[in-house]
């Protein structure tokens, strides 16, 4: 059945549709109240640039009928997570924004967390914060201002923070609950934007320190007051009504869309989030999908206010109230979110357009080089120290963008040479691809020339796979210089071209990823103890032994009978043998 005939068979029911290209890859997923009308609209009339480009790539489509618009919204979200389609850029990043969590179990504690609406969090949440650094700086400031609990788990004895006055010792001390609650309530007031009390208190301390000629202490208090003003002061957006709610609005221009979210806490503007993307399909579908994704990943029980044209698409789809307003302060905030979106579009549209042109240029150049579409690239690198802690890393690029969720790390056989290591990691990777029916790359890049390509060809051939393989050659200065194809032909790359910079960045990225993993393993090995190798000695027993005897050398001086006083007989014997048979100990 050709595409035109297939369009006639579409039902007029709600559901999701999956657009596919010539290689049967899903390139776009959308939802519709009426599948027939929505899918047919792509092939009728004029569209903006990105929708036109999508339509030019469509060779087939599938659809799934559901019972309601809400079911379509949920299904669309899950299908996009599954297929990662090229044209659904809005869904690429599945990370939630950071929040500041304030809890008062076993003493008040403040920390930066990432959550989603399915998690049950004990404590009060503030956010989201688009800038994780700002959230961490705020938490750091609160830890300076208040003696808060720092430990993740309650310890059996006080730690350094207690001794330097930055914790009250909630783990072992009987802290007055009123004192604990007082600190907790002060933090809540600060995060809600009320800094008057604590500012007044620190001004008194600053003046007293000045009177006592302790100018260093006075400067410290002054700096804390300034930090407070910068970190905690919130813009007052509700003069007479101290409510908490969220506002989202958008603007569209020349095929691009910007969305702005305002997060109001007790009448004050807590934070804002801005998003820009090219627009595929209609505005209402895009914004409702964006908001569903956002609130799937980010906690909220506040009312949400949106422009009136979105209301019918959003009502009943969330666990919180969604409504609109036409006057008053909340309407003013809706207008402000719209104005922010307009300005964000003006400032960033050129950047997005240049990025689009850059990625499209790379796709065209790789298509010219390899005479086929390249959508998924996997690149490998090894790292070791004299054959020890041998590791490999794989980075993945999809549509020429990093796909960090697909990165992989491998521990390899110790002492193997580089070619054996390459053989091992490639075999392990592509055996798993076959076994689990994972997505196959269009291009494998290995670090090296003919010998390395031969190893990769042998592995891929032994697994009965057909994947393009190239080597990344270097000059005498160890800089990226050329590509070598599987027939050992040199593919010269101009060193001022986008392809050259892209390959260099890929090489730097996989090298960074491998080296970081190798360093972590090496650092871990430095702290490895013979006690880690004795079955029956767990973390608690190990800590107890090291606290009493201080070093492994001191433990080595003990007889078996002396060790039996600390451990069970079989464990004591095993430890004694390991201590005396292993030269490194």
Image (cartoon, rainbow, N blue to C red):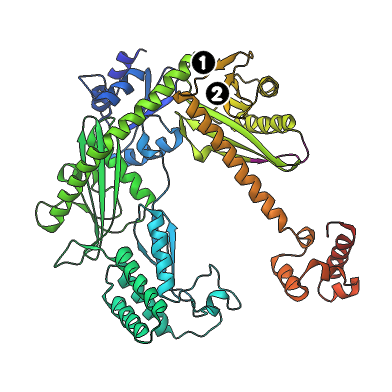
Can residue 278 be spotted in the picture? no
Was residue 414 drawn as part of the magenta stretch in this picture?
A: yes
Can residue 412 be spotted in the picture? yes
Is residue 291 toward the left or the right of residue 120 in the image? left
Q: Residue at x 42, y 47 (%)?
A: 95
Where residue 134 sits in the image (x, y, percent)? 38, 58
The secondary structure making up most of the magenta span is loop
Which mark identifies residue 370?
1
Residue with the mark numbered 2: 443
**Quadrant occupied by the N terminus:** top left
As rendered, which of 510 and 178 lies closer to the eye? 510
Q: Is residue 535 above or below residue 406?
A: below
State the CA–CA distance, disc 2 to disc 1.
9 Å
Was residue 528 drawn as part of the magenta stretch in this picture?
A: no
Which mark identifies residue 329?
none
Q: Estimate how packed mark 1 is, as few (under 14), some (14 to 19) or many (20 or more) residues with alpha carbons within 10 Å.
A: few
Where residue 417 sits in the image (x, y, percent)? 76, 33
How many dots with numbers? 2
As rendered, which of 206 and 455 lies closer to the eye? 206
Q: Residue at x 56, y 81 (%)?
A: 172
As rendered, which of 12 and 195 lies closer to the eye? 195
As rendered, which of 501 and 569 lies closer to the eye? 501
Task: Please give the range of residues in magenta.
Answer: 410-416
Callouts 2 and 1 close, C-beta under 8 Å? yes
Q: Is residue 466 above or below residue 217?
A: above
Helix, strand or loop at mark 2? strand
Is residue 335 toward the left or the right of residue 80 in the image? left
């Amino acid at each position: 059945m050709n595409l035109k005939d297939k369009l006639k068979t579409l039902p007029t029911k709600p559901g999701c549709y999956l657009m596919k290209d010539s290689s049967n890859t899903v390139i776009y997923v959308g939802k519709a109240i009426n599948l027939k009308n929505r899918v047919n609209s792509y092939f009728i009339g004029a569209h903006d640039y990105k929708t036109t480009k999508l339509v030019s790539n469509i060779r087939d489509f599938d659809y799934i009928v559901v019972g309601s618009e809400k079911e379509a919204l949920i299904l669309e979200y899950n299908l996009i997570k599954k297929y990662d389609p090229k044209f659904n850029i809005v869904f690429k990043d599945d990370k939630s924004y950071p929040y500041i969590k304030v809890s008062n179990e076993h003493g008040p504690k403040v920390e930066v967390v990432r959550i989603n609406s399915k998690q049950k969090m004990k404590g009060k949440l503030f956010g989201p914060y688009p800038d994780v650094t700002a959230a961490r700086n705020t938490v750091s400031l609160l830890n300076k201002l208040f003696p808060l609990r720092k430990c993740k788990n309650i310890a059996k004895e006080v730690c350094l923070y207690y001794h330097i006055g930055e914790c009250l010792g909630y783990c072992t001390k009987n802290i007055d609950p009123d004192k604990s609650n007082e600190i907790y309530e002060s933090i809540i007031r600060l995060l809600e934007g009320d800094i008057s009390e604590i500012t007044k208190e620190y001004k008194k301390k600053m003046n007293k320190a000045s009177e006592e000629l302790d100018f260093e202490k006075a400067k410290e208090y002054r700096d804390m007051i300034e930090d407070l003003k910068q970190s905690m002061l919130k813009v007052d957006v509700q003069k007479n009504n101290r409510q908490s709610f969220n506002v989202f609005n958008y603007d569209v221009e020349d095929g691009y869309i910007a969305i702005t979210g305002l997060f109001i806490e007790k009448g004050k503007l807590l934070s804002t989030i801005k998003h820009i993307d090219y627009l595929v399909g209609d505005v209402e579908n895009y914004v409702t999908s964006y908001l569903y994704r956002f609130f799937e990943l980010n906690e909220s029980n506040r009312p949400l206010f949106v422009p009136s044209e979105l209301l019918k698409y959003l009502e009943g789809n969330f666990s919180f109230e969604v409504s609109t307003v036409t006057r008053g302060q909340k309407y003013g905030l809706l207008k402000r979110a719209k104005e922010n979106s307009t300005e964000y579009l003006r400032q960033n549209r050129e950047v997005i357009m240049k990025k689009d042109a850059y990625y499209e240029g790379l796709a065209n150049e790789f298509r010219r080089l390899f005479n086929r579409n390249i959508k998924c690239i996997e690149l490998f690198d090894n790292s070791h120290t004299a054959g020890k802690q041998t590791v490999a890393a794989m980075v993945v690029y999809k549509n020429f963008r990093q796909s960090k969720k697909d990165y992989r790390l491998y521990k390899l056989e110790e002492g193997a040479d580089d070619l054996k290591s390459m053989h091992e990691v490639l075999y392990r990777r592509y055996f798993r691809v076959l076994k689990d029916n994972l997505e196959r790359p269009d291009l494998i890049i290995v670090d090296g020339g003919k010998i390395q390509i031969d190893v990769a060809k042998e592995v891929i051939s032994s697994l009965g796979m057909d994947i393009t393989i190239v080597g990344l050659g270097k000059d005498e200065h160890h800089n990226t210089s050329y590509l070598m194809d599987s027939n050992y032909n040199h593919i010269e790359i101009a060193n001022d071209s986008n392809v050259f910079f892209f390959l260099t960045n890929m090489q730097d990225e996989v090298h960074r990823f491998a080296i970081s993993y190798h360093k972590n393993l090496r650092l871990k090995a430095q702290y490895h103890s013979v006690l880690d190798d004795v079955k029956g000695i767990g973390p608690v027993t190990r800590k107890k032994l090291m606290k009493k005897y201080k070093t492994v050398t001191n433990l080595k001086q003990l007889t078996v009978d002396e060790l039996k006083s600390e451990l069970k007989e079989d464990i004591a014997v095993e430890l004694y043998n390991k201590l005396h048979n292993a030269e490194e100990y």
